[in-house]
Image (tube, grey):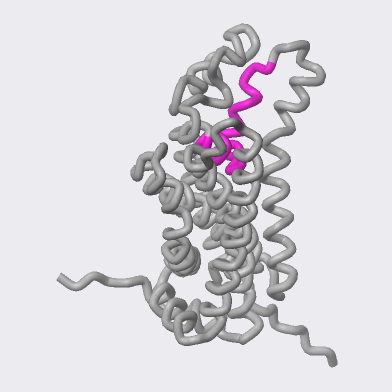
């Protein structure tokens, strides 16, 4: 049985691996992670020198969250750059209309663009695995945590790629699409905190269900993820909130790892909704889908 690969994914991967850009990008990626790794190792060594034992091997487990957070930050900056120019780049090269005349649906085109970006990120993550594996070799963490981290990074890459594709579908220039994608980033991260900030200032200790919007916030998701791995505790648990302070749904989701898994489902759903909106925007059946409007003839 022959597996049918998305033509967009196949074309983008073939173009990317044949250029030196991916090699230089991989070099820069590894260099940034190496710098973060060495700085974290230096800090651990300095802090261990002030202890009586002077043994740094028990502290090497903290190299994992440092390198992992550095990877998440790089992905958050890199994914919008490569996806924000996917649709707008086709418009600049005047190949957008040709792409839309193929038998592929608009959603399959958008999904293919996002998938190719996620696969390119996985190249970088696979290359950086030996750096991250040191904290697992020393001990203190389960190897299953590395697998779950890869799944979390893929989930975050899908959300970042879908935001970049949506920005690219609205803009005709790649630079404007990149800027718009970072603006969408800021709106997603900031607006999900607004109800919580409002209730903390004017709610008189009653937060209600205002924290449910944080389920769609990737920052809160990764903070909860690393808390569960490193300490087994939750940022919403341990009696931090009572039933009188928060609503029933928030109190139920703050129990153990429930919040993290529900947040992963919300982020995945949001990714597909954003991709569906981008597919609707580039659909030629809708007005303003990206093609140039015919100019009126002037007598």
**Which SS type dominates the magenta stretch?**
helix
Residue 187 in sight from this viewpoint:
yes
Quarter of the figure that contains the N terminus: bottom left
- What residue sits 66% from the left and 68% below the top? 288
**Which segment did they paint magenta?**
207-226
Q: Residue 218 placed where, x, y %?
A: 58, 43
Which residue, as the protein is rendered here, is positioned at the far left?
1
**Residue sitting nearer the eye, 288 or 152:** 152
**Residue sitting nearer the eye, 4 or 278:** 4
Asked if the stretch drawn in magenta spans residue 218, the answer is: yes
Q: Residue 155 placed where, x, y %?
A: 47, 50
- What residue sits 45% from the left and 23% below the top? 256
Asked if the stretch drawn in magenta spans residue 227, the answer is: no
Question: Looking at the image, is 87 positioned above or below residue 187?
Answer: below
Question: Looking at the image, is 156 positioned above or below residue 57?
Answer: below
Q: Residue 257 placed where, x, y %?
A: 44, 28
Quarter of image, res 237: top right
Quarter of the figure that contains the C terminus: bottom right
Residue 164 in sight from this viewpoint:
no
Q: Is residue 82 left or right of residue 152?
A: right
Quarter of image, res 35: bottom right
Which residue, as the protein is rendered here, is positioned at the far front?
52
Which residue, as the protein is rendered here, is positioned at the far bottom?
299
Q: How many marks?
A: 0
- What residue sits 71% from the left and 26% below the top? 196
Which residue, as the protein is rendered here, is positioned at the far right?
299
Quarter of image, res 175: bottom right
Question: Looking at the image, is 52 positioned above or below residue 219?
Answer: above
**Residue sitting nearer the eye, 72 or 262:** 72
**Residue sitting nearer the eye, 18 or 265:** 18
- What residue sits 76% from the left and 27% below the top? 197
């Amino acid at each position: 049985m022959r597996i049918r690969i998305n033509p967009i994914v196949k074309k983008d991967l073939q173009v990317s691996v044949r250029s030196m850009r991916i090699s230089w990008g991989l070099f820069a990626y590894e260099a940034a992670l190496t710098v973060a790794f060495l700085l974290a190792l230096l800090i651990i060594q300095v802090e261990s020198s002030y202890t009586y034992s002077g043994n740094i091997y028990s502290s090497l487990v903290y190299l994992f969250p440092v390198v992992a957070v550095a990877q998440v930050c790089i992905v958050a900056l890199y994914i919008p750059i490569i996806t924000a120019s996917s649709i707008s780049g086709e418009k600049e090269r005047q190949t957008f209309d040709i792409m839309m005349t193929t038998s592929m649906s608009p959603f399959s085109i958008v999904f293919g663009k996002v998938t190719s970006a996620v696969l390119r990120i996985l190249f970088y993550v696979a290359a950086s695995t030996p750096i991250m594996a040191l904290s697992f070799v020393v001990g203190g963490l389960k190897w299953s945590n590395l697998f779950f981290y890869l799944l979390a990074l893929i989930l975050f890459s899908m959300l970042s790629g879908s935001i970049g594709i949506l920005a690219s579908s609205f803009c005709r220039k790649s630079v404007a699409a990149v800027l718009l994608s970072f603006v969408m980033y800021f709106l997603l991260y900031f607006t999900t905190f607004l109800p919580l900030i409002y209730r903390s200032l004017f709610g008189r200790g009653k937060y209600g269900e205002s924290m449910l919007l944080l389920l769609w916030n990737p920052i809160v998701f990764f903070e909860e993820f690393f808390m569960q791995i490193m300490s087994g505790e939750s940022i919403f648990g341990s009696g931090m909130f009572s039933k009188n302070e928060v609503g029933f749904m928030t109190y139920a989701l703050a129990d153990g790892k429930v919040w993290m898994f529900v947040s992963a489902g919300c982020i995945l759903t949001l990714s597909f909704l954003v991709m569906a909106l981008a597919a609707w925007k580039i659909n030629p059946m809708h007005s303003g889908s990206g093609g140039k409007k015919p100019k009126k003839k002037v007598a």
